[in-house]
Image (cartoon, rainbow, N blue to C red):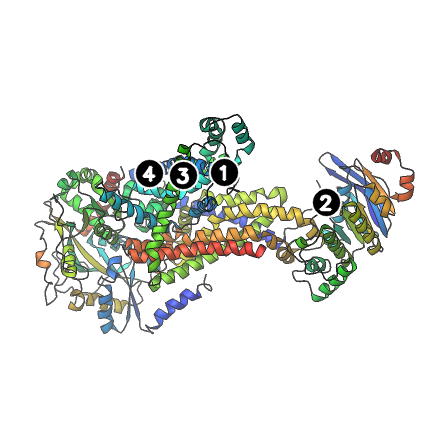
Amino acid sequence: MLTLDRITFRREDFVLHADVSVEGPGIVAVIGPSGGGKSTLLSLIAGFELPDEGRVCWNNAEMTNLAPGERPVAVLFQDNNLFPHLDAATNVALGASPRARPPPAARDRAAEALSAVGLDGMGERMPGELSGGQQSRVALARALLTDRPLVLMDEAFSALGPALRLEMLTLVKSLLADKTVLMVTHDPDDARRVARQTMFVEDGRLRPAEDTGALFANPHDALARYLA
Amino acid sequence: MAERAQPLGAAGVIGIAAAAAIPLLILLATVAIIRVAEPGNGPTQADWAALRFTLWQAFLSATFSVALAVPVARALARRRFPGRGALVTLLGAPFLLPVIVAIFGLLAVFGRSGLVNSGLGMLGLPQISIYGLHGVVLAHVFFNLPLATRLILQGWQDIPSERFRLAASLGMDATAVNRHLERPMLRQVVPGAALVIFVICTMSFAVALTLGGGPRATTVELAIYQALRFEFDLDRAAFLALVQLAITVFLAMLAYRILRHQGFAHGLDRPLMRWDGRTPALRLLDGFLILIAALFLLVPIASAVARGAPEVVGLPQAVWVSALRSLCVAGASTALVVVLAVAMALAATRLKDRGGWIETAGLTALAASPLVLGTGIFVLVHPVANPEALALPVTALVNAIVTLPFALRALVPACRTIESEYGRLADTLGLRGWARLRLVVLPRLLRPLGFSAGLAAALSMGDLGVIALFADPDTATLPLQVYRLMGAYRMEEAGGAAVLLLVLSFGAFWMLDRGARRADA
Amino acid sequence: MRIPCLGAGLVMAAGAATAGSLPELTVITYDSFVSEWGPGPAVEAAFEETCACDLNFVAAGDGAALLARVKLEGERSEADIVLGIDTNLTAEAMATGLFAPHGCMAADLDVPVPWEDEIFLPYVWGYFAFVHDTGLEGVPQSFEELADSDVSIIIQDPRSSTPGLGLLLWVKAAYGDRAAEIWSALADNVVTVTPGWSEAYGMFLEGEADMVLSYTTSPAYHLIAEGDAGKAAAPFSEGHYMQVEVAGKLASTDQPELADRFLSFMLTDAFQEIIPTTNWMYPAVIPDNGLPDGFETLIQPAKPLLLSAAEARTVRVPALDEWLNALSR
């Protein structure tokens, strides 16, 4: 369970408040207008930013002051998910062992993860030789390999076309079924398709996660305004 | 303000230490100089003369370089011809060219028995002498005309092409284009270019050493060298070093203010589509200018190569030993630049907005000329050890410090880009320390690093400054060896050694720069 | 630096290995002494025949720069003997306290001045003169004539070079208080000022100037070694300043006995007969077989000039300022 305990984050004249818990596993969509604080929220959870007040906890263990790499968190960014000078297998293996030379065991597991995302035998390809969809799959394979229970996706597939994006979301849903996935998206349809719950963020205020179906069936005023 | 304080890591700590150590070393050297400089012993007439000559030759060199560069840059900006790209690249070459090699080439062309005087002799005209003021200015123009041309050409490239299109649609001729587009640009670019060259020329030592003719053509830097090596007058050397320091600090601050907003030259191989200046007379003029500029640059180097290349094989052992010494100095200097620059760039990146001072700290090296820094170290070292015993390490160190600003200029932005693009990914993966450096930073940094290393190697290989101050007769580096052979009028051997030096300098640059590019491709 | 320089070390070690473990005597001297056509190689061979040692010459610029180097290195110097400063610098050199008495009985010297110096021994002497091609028209016969003419000259820097310093004192000895005036008048004749004699003479031979400051004996080189009678020294009516070059033992030497033996050797025929046709000056002791043929053709200054070592030391700094001021205008 992810808990954001009375979080306040200030940056110049922007303020974000969050006091919510998210129960895993499953996909939780984070939607809301741009500049509302979606990405800041993810940064606070990942550890890129520190809250001015409040605590971030995972299963009641505080991780507010842990470095990003020490948190039980894997992240899929919008872009730059892969190091372009490392081949696909090495990129994935880094999820198992962040050392200069990943041990052979990590490489074996990377190969398995690549098969799982449908990239069997493509481990030696460089990211530049892969299509956008394939690159996303490599990043997903790494998230699989990290064994971290919480996965953050910051508009991870927004650069892909609609069909490909749906394919990736479906893949995420099936492969990361045992993890808690927080998915920032600008497209409410993404939330409708795969998210068990949805959180709405606007003007630095985070509403608790609600059941996606119920929320969209009966949107509150703010959501209705956003969807309109 | 809650932003995750990024851990500095070992490299960052080294970087901060280095960034602090460089101004500290310069300060220490300055303090040492001030302590030794005899305050009651005011400037003599000869000191004033050295100061006057330094400023006057720098003024003339900057004026001629820029005045000649404007028409050449305009010709290059508005003409397309085969080899244009190669010529523009060539304009960057003098930066890497060892001074002593250029002087050897200039002597072969403009010396008493050189091409120009032979031609004048055949025509029955009086001979020209390359020694003294005109020789110094000639050599400085040789080195700085290309630089000025590049800077001014950049100005031309920065004029938005829409304006030229507009001018063309309005039917402006070359004169009108000049008034409305070019002159405003030149007013912006020329003072900066002239100032940069002025600063460079006030710090020029090797040219004055070889072509300066006695007290009439002595720069402050040369006077420092003479005080130290001719008379072993530490007081006077220190006093002169202070004078030189004052000049450079003043000019460096002036240049910093003027040049802050100008970037490095880039994308110069793209000629502008121009519609004006299509008359045959202007074409002929431009062609002539480009030809003359190319000959002025190429003939001295080609003469040096032609005269020296056949001698390389038969060079005496002493020359090869000095070449080996130069390779060691260049290798050590390059390694130092690479380590310091990477560490400082990492520190600057990790300190984020508070890291600006690190680059500035590196830039302070520009305020102290190598010879002043060398004098300071000499004064520091002399009471405890024989400075001559430290000739090679000190040369490597000073060369590294002098190259560092260029390396930082290339590496800091590159490091910042890497951090902004891949920093968070590396963070979430828990990549830290050596693994992060090895897997993420170094591979992405390869190109600017190769370029910086190449620059450091070439500059250090060709340096004839600090080494002249420190070297004893037994520890000559290759440039000093060339100078000594020239002094002894062993011109064949000097030529061979000059070609060897040329090959080593450009070879080192090419290997490191191209090597990194190839590995990155 | 040490490890990457292993290669350089090996090359040098290879050179040193041939010398075995013989005691080493290091003599620092001026450039032209050790050049292949200078006295160095022959002197080295002759001394090593008798000394069971390894004689090692180190060149350090011209004579005056030698003294700067001795001061710079101080007691840390690895040199045993300094050879090539002249009497204009001996007082200054003695004041450093870095030299030790030679302890030799000065043999019958053929130096035209009485010799009582306990620190330095002379090994060669000569007269300074401007050397020119015999084809030169209107050869000046005095400094004043030179200053009035268009004749171009190359001179040496008095701070680094003993000939340069000699010229400075020549003008001072001849003109006294008028020296500054003479230098101002000479300024436009000076093509360039070189750090040492080698550079200046080389430039003269390449045709960079009409005359060069050298010695009355320099034409002998062209006559004897090259069979070329085309060079001459211009006799000046003011007289010619004399140079007596000396060697001295450094107090810090680790080979004091060997150094003494070298200083004694220096005044024997074995050394002295090498001098006339390599250093192209007068030997301090005329060897048994006399001066080589050709030396009799050289000009003999009517009026030799020489300041005493003490006078030279007093005059040097003010004269140097006069020179710098005149030539820096």
Q: Which residue is mark 1?
A: B154
- Closer to the N terminus: mark 3 or mark 4? 4
Horizontal side, residue B495 vs residue B444: left or right: left
User: Circle 2: is it few (<14), some (14-19), or many (20+) Cα within 10 Å?
Assistant: many
Secondary structure of the residue carrying numbered label 2: loop
User: Circle 1: is it few (<14), some (14-19), or many (20+) Cα within 10 Å?
Assistant: many
Q: Chain of mark 4?
A: B
Do tags 3 and 2 sit on the same chain?
no
Q: Quadrant of the C terminus of chain B?
A: bottom right
Q: Which residue is mark 3?
A: B287
Q: Which residue is mark 2?
A: A49
The residue lying toward the viewer, choosing from B387 and B344, is B344
Horizontal side, residue B1 vs residue B92: left or right: right
- Residue C65 percent across, percent down from the top left: 28, 53
Disc sitting over residue B53 in the figure:
4
Residue plotted at (27% across, 39% down): C328
Do tags 1 and 2 sit on the same chain?
no
